[in-house]
Image: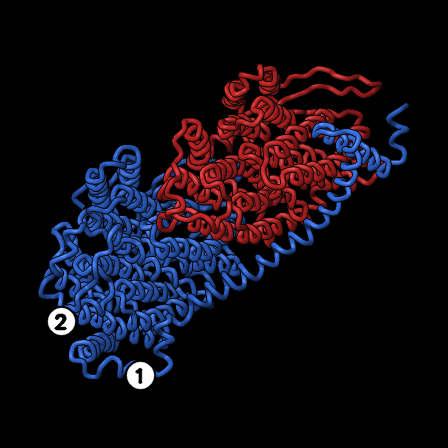
Chain colours: A red, B blue
Amino acid sequence: MLTTFLLLPLGGAVLSALLPHDRAREARWIALVFAMAAFLVSVVMFVMFDRTAEGYQFVDQFDWIAAGDFTIQYVVGVDGLSAPLVLLLGLLSVVAVLVSWNIDVKPKQYFAWLLILEAAVAGVFISLDLIQFFLFWELELIPMYLLISQWGSGRRLYSATKFLIYTLAGSALMLAGFLVLGVEAGTFDMAQIAADPPTEAIVPMAAVFWAIMLAFLVKLPVFPFHTWLPDAHTDAPTAVSVMLAGVLLKMGGYGILRIVVSIMPEQAIEFRTVLATLAGFSVIWGAIITLRQTDLKRLVAYSSVSHMGYVLLGVAALGPVGLSGAALQMFTHGTITGLLFVMVGMVYDRTHTREISQMSGLMHRMPVIGVAMLLAGLASLGLPGMSGFVAELTTFLGAFGPHPTATIFAIFGVVLSAGYILWMIQRVFHGPPTEQWAHLTDAREWWEYAAIVSLVVAIIGVGIYPAILTDVVEAGIAPIAAIVEAAS
Amino acid sequence: MMLPDIPQAAVWAIYFAPITSFLVIVALLRDRPLQAGRFTILAIGVAWLLSVWALDTTIGHDGEALAWGTHHWFSLFNFEVSFGIRLDGLSGVMIFVVTSISLLVQVYSTGYMSGDGGYSRFFALMSLFTAAMLGLVMASSLLQLFIHWELVGLTSYLLIGFWFHRPSAAAAAKKAFIVTRFGDFGFMLALVLIWSKTGTFDIAEINALAQDGLSAAVLTGFVLGLFAGAAGKSAQFPLHFWLPDAMEGPTPVSSIVHSATMVAAGVYLLARMFPAVDASPGEVQTTIAYIGGFTAIFAATMGVVATDIKRVLAYSTISQLGYMVMAIGLGGYVAAIFHLFTHAFFKSLLFQGAGSVSHATNTFEMPLMGGLRKVMPVTFITFLIGSLSLAGVFPLAGFWSKDEILLDAYNHDKILWVVGTAVAFLTALYMFRAIFMTFFGEYRGGAKPEHGGHDAHDDAHGHGGPHESPRSMLIPLIALSIPAILFGLVAPSGFFGELVEGALPEAMRHFHFHANVVVVVTSTVAALGGIAVAAAIYYAGKPQSSVIRAKFGPLAPVVERLYYVNEVAEDGIVRGALYNGAARGAALFDKYVVDMAVNMVGTVTQFTGSILRRTITGQVQSYTSIFILGVVGAAGALLVLSGGLLDRLVP
């Protein structure tokens, strides 16, 4: 089933690329069909997921490359940690296709790369082998680089390159770390390494820990490795921003939980205070800088820095509740920031500017977009009844015991987020109607509605009934928490 | 007493009735304003009937909580969240207050809001607010309470900004949300702290643990955190300054959200957690009492100089909430709730009266009014009743509840008693100043109707001079006059005190009604003195108010500028220290220090790339070259990290 999830978008990409030139516009239908199919597979997987069982489910496995003592295998599977992320990826990929509906510059290539991006991220979330994980991690860079540099705006080449360099610098360290781990353990199979993790290596384990951790911290991102994010977002097309904030950042958080904490719990415990400090600082730093942003998209991008600090804080708590909070936050932030970027994109499509100071009173001309933006903003500032609140509260509860100071800072981030969100709403949507924007039209295409509604349903649905998610997350976090417990 | 006990499902129905009307309006009645209004009234009417039943049940149980289980919401390991209803004397009274006032305000709104383009939206939001407020008061767990606490904050935001095309309304809405969020920061800390120490959010369990078991340090943090939340919601100094601006919302909103119910939620929270407050160290309670007392007199002085009638009432609300908070800090649980109860009715009445006046004159500025008692007799008489009740004139409701607070102050802290009595004088002064400026003298012309969205007058109301309001607005005014007159009379029997004390553990129930001659006489003298001074200045004109103002010298403008709190908070702290200070510094640091390191790396790479690009062109190739660089870098890192690694890879 998971292999199907991985191959569907690849198949779509191939078909899209093979389209005759005069029918290039139809690539969007191919992309939509294949993204929808993959999404349905992820929904079926999520529904069928056995919430009472720990460990990996829907596993597909075969040996791929055998070299001496080492076999590099193809092995995919999900547990309660990755299952929600796979579902999130399925959903956001459909949304990404929808919001790209009017792309007319080289649409064949565009949709092919978008689908390849989905496949690459899918590979990261479902791979259970370190080398395989690394390959997908690298594969994701190609479509991202091209999508930003070819279909982006502004300083797109600079931003795409910056994104590339950051990630590559991180992944170089990551690969080194993986090789050390694999060589010491005699296997690259994640489950096997986690069951019997190497306790010492030819280099200090702390070095291995930080090598791998840095790669993930860059991706997450946290201060001071975050400056690639606003640039990449600002210059990326809407769909790519949705994917980037929605799922690509989660690769960092996922990697920390799946690999760093599960395989090196002792080092995680040793450095938890450093991580918590970084997290608390990142939350406040990101939020304060968000306050200053004058570009709508940069504002949302910087708010992600702040919100991903919560993920790291939950991880640093290392208890079951805190880790669950981190896992929940990854899912909820994906849907919330996804919606924010979708809405920013719709505003930009109409006003052709992202300068907040240029806008005023847009609510009069586009109430649907305004209300959707308000909902996304309220979810982002942690309003109860929306998904973000549950995740943030869980994180705070889990983190307060071990890290009271960092948690207090993080909670203050909630006050700041109310500041930048509501101020943005006031400046962009409130105020009297203006001549300048009298010609704007509201959302009225089916694909605009589909994108908005699907994300709003996900946000409010999880907010009102979090048990959809929490049962699965609990099943996924329990073994990780047990590993940490055993190590301390 | 006649009725059987209310089943739990029926209490849930009180909560879900307004939720239903919200959903129905959003889904079906967006374009049918008339039905939206009627459906809201129907739903809240049902809720009101059930709330009477609920109140009757709690009376039958002497205010003790009904033993009802909770409903599981979700859980993550030992973090379990359940929702339930805690129906006892305290919540029974609150449910009754919320549904009663909400029902009357909805009726009033059908008249006041008629013709407004956002009529359906208004009733949808009012329904949502009512539901959230009901959820807040009936919650059995502190987390459930907090969730609804935030939701009433949301609806308050949306209702203050109801006329969002006005920049002032949009700004006021944002300000209200953010200032109260500062308080909620404390509330969230309290939640996180208490959970990490007790592992529960259940209100009864926390209160029981607080009475024996929790350390003084934990209780101090917990109660101060809750108090921060309460200070935000209930507009206590220094978080009070959002409430006067909140008057930008439609007047029916002010009449329920920003006077009777939501702003009282902070006091309710402290009362709900009173066993914890009571167990906290004395310094904590004293702090609460003094902040309340200071807020009461501080806000009252601003009420004396305001010229906008709604703002007078807003300062009055802050001041009266200060009374209640002071009572809580003094251990006067019953007095605080009793005053909350009576205040809800007469303050709602006064706001609706102010709305009725502006309906006739198109303004809230009292200097533009005058002489309205002749053309608006019903509004005048009901407003007078509300003012007398608020001023604490015997035997109206406000007299009884205010005296219980002053009595608690007299018994525990003479300074606060003096402050409280001075507040009683100022209260009578500013209310009768408002009455004389609004209803006496000559009509000063009002203002021209503001087309396209001011307080919802259809154009027919714009000409022909001031006139009495429609019946839909007068009925609620008359209905609210009854509790404003009568509801204090339950005090001497001790019935109310016993009912709300039923919510406390048995050991803490010690309410007995008694009156103290000194307190009664001084407060009555203060109230009548206030009325007399107001009459002398604003009716007889001897001495002229400008003469008095001059006597106060430089103090008068300070009060008129509201003690510069807005300037300090907005220009000083938010704009100055945060936005232009810390945020600017951080943004610059991010750009020039953090990012510079990267750009240096970037420059080097771009340089390398440009060399490569001379021989190989195209994006994919450029990627490939960077990828190769990456792999080389990885291999390099590998070699650095491990000298012997290669030997082991290649046997």
What secondary structure is marked by label 2? loop
Q: Position of residue A121 (x, y in %)?
A: 62, 28
**Count of numbered circles in the view:** 2
Q: Position of residue B286 (x, y in %)?
A: 43, 68
Q: Is residue B485 left or right of residue B202?
A: left
What secondary structure is marked by label 1? helix
From this view, report whether residue B624 is shown above or below residue B68: above
Q: Chain of mark 1?
A: B
Camera-nearest residue between A191 and B125: B125
Q: Is residue A461 left or right of residue B577?
A: left
Q: Position of residue B276 (x, y in %)?
A: 43, 57
* Tag of residue B421: none
Q: Position of residue A343 (x, y in %)?
A: 47, 38
From this view, report whether residue A125 is shown above or below residue B361: above
Camera-nearest residue between B270 and B558: B558
Q: Label 1, label 2: how many angstroms apart (C-alpha)?
A: 25 Å
Q: Which residue is mark 2?
A: B442
Q: Residues within 10 Å of mark 2 (few under 14, many from 20)?
A: few
- Residue at image position (54%, 50%) is A293
- Quarter holding the C terminus of chain A? top right
Q: Chain of mark 2?
A: B
Residue A323 occupies quadrant: top right
The amino acid type found where label 1 is placed reads Ala
Give whichever of discs 1 and 2 has the lower sequence position.
2
Q: Is residue A193 left or right of residue A45?
A: right
From this view, report whether residue B460 is shown above or below residue B11: below
From this view, report whether residue A427 is shown above or below residue B73: below
Q: Is residue A142 visible?
A: yes
Q: Which residue is mark 1?
A: B550
- Residue at image position (21%, 67%) is B368
The amino acid type found where label 2 is placed reads Glu
Q: Is residue A54 visible?
A: no
